[in-house]
Amino acid sequence: MKNLFRKYYHSTLLPGEFNEFLSYFNNKKNEISIHGEILPLWNQSLEEHETLPEPNSVLFKKVKDAIYLNERKILQNKIKIFSYSLRIAAILIVALLISSVVYYQKTSKNEFAVQMQTISTPFGARIKTVLPDSSIVWLNSGSSLTFPTVFGKFRKVTLLGEAFFEVTKNSNPFIVSAKGKEVEVKGTSFNVKSFPETKSLETTLVEGTVIVRNTVTMKEVTLRPGQHATLTENEISVKNVETNILTCWKDGKLIFNKEPFPEFVKKLERWYNVKIEYDDQTLNDLWYTGTIEMETISEVMEMLSIAAPVTYSFNNKERVFTIKAKGSK
């Protein structure tokens, strides 16, 4: 075994000898013996600088030739692949040039042609996205925002629904458009709401300055932080508000302060993606104050039935809640 260790140390083991050595080496019972055989060889090599045995010249030449042939084959394959890649690249370049010419011809006819994209959120969901100018937008449930992939002189977006904006400061005006109404800023934080079922646009300013404008009548007003503007077809009304109540939805909660029952119900429908029905119009005189954050829709309806003189039922198949005044049939 000592001779095998010496041959192993000098890399001159024959195939049969290597199998014998490997079997011995892998046996954990031989660890002490292996250490005893290897250590003297290592020390002897350091002390005497002995000359290693000459390798088998015939075997060495065969190995060398095999390596050369393998490397040559790999190189030839690379050349073939590279040549094929060049042909593909040439085809792609031609296609790119053709598409560029077509695009140039189209845009030369209309210098204002831009590529638009739309982000939408289903009911029951909210998303946060970043616009091409690095402005940040939170999009509420049941809302959509359309904007160009590259902003030009005016950074204009079109909103349907509700969104909270943190606009990057820039010399180019940032404009939110909805239903013939606009909110113009240069760098600020604000909330805009304009859902399809309403004809108004509501803006709540948190920080900075905004101009709200009716593009039909050209009436406009400048808001200060803490102010809320409502734009209808012919009027603009402004009032002071607690901005956190109107913007907390982006943080995953709803805060109500004497919220009229119809508005309360509508917000629940969007927030939980359900349908809530009621026929008793006397319920419109109710209002709700409270905070909804982690509660399920079932928990909310249960709290409502305790806080208000109402009962409810739920159609699981159609996801419809029906609310009735207590005592009614």
Image (cartoon, rainbow, N blue to C red):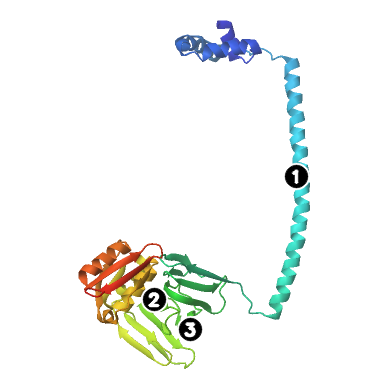
Q: What residue sits right under mark 3 in the picture?
A: 179
**Residue 73: quarter of image:** top right
Residue positioned 25% across, 77% down in the render: 287
| x and y, in percent, of residue 268 in the image | 34, 70
> In front: 232, or 300?
300
Dot label at residue 329:
none
Task: State which quarter of the image contains the C terminus.
Answer: bottom left
Q: Residues within 10 Å of mark 1 (few under 14, many from 20)?
A: few
Question: How much space separates mark 1 and mark 3, taking CA atoms?
Answer: 57 Å
Q: Nearer the viewer, mark 1 or mark 3?
A: 3
- Element assignment for label 3: loop
Amino acid type at circle 2 is Phe
Q: Are marks 2 and 1 in contact (CB under 8 Å)?
A: no
| x and y, in percent, of residue 129 in the image | 47, 66
| x and y, in percent, of residue 230 in the image | 37, 85
Residue positioned 32% across, 75% down in the render: 278
Q: Residues within 10 Å of mark 2 (few under 14, many from 20)?
A: many
Would residue 239 be visible to someone looking at this image? Answer: yes
